[in-house]
Amino acid sequence: MKREFDKLSWGQKRIKEVVKHIQICISKREHYEGYRKNLNDKSYMIMNKKDVEDYQKSYKEIDIFLKQFPHLKDTVLEVLKKKSGKNLFRKLNEHSKELQAKQEDIAKKHNSLAVQYNELENLKVNMNEYMESDETEKKESVIDAIKKQLVKYNDKSKEKKDVNREIER
């Protein structure tokens, strides 16, 4: 049982915790209502102090739970009014199963996206390496082209000088 509890998601753990608190509220409700009817009865409070405090603590936990999961508020409040948890436990169980299914879907999507992300990162690195190597090749080829043009220009100018010398003779 403990292993199952460890494997559950946070939402599922909260549901299990609140179910315990709801059971406490249902069982201790009579003591709390007796305390509220007569707040000044010290003897009643002495006899039922622990039950009233347990009820109040559990009710606070249920309130926190309902703020976290507002879509379950009507169901939980209905159960607390009727003092029967059968319907609630079934609905919370269904909700817990839905959460687990959604969690598994999200985990699958996350894993596939992580694989795609890694592939894209590798592609990015490869593209950057290619672009950097391509730029250096272009720079070298541009420099080489300029050198070749200079050589051609020098060759043409030498030929013109040679032609001019021959004409002058």
Image: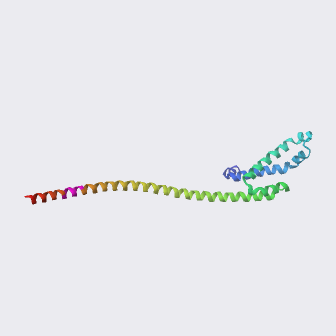
Snapshot quadrant of residue 52: top right
Asked if residue 21 lies in the magenta stretch, the reply is no
User: Which residue sits at x=46%, y=56%?
Assistant: 124
Q: Residue furthest front?
A: 168
Q: Which x, y percent locates residue 99? A: 68, 57
Snapshot quadrant of residue 155: bottom left
Q: Quadrant of the C terminus?
A: bottom left
Q: Is residue 54 above or below residue 120?
A: above
Q: Which x, y percent locates residue 156? A: 19, 59
User: Which residue sits at x=89%, y=41%?
Assistant: 45
What's the coloring here?
rainbow
Q: Is residue 169 left or right of residue 67?
A: left
Q: Which x, y percent locates residue 78? A: 82, 57
Q: Is residue 37 left or right of residue 144?
A: right
Q: Which x, y percent locates residue 15? A: 73, 53
User: Which residue sits at x=82%, y=44%?
Assistant: 54
Magenta-highlighted stretch: main secondary structure? helix
Q: Residue furthest left?
A: 169
Q: Is residue 95 left or right of residue 85?
A: left
- How many labels sit on residues? 0
User: Which residue sits at x=70%, y=49%?
Assistant: 2
| Highlighted magenta segment, given as a residue range | 150-156
Asked if residue 151 lies in the magenta stretch, the reply is yes
Snapshot quadrant of residue 152: bottom left
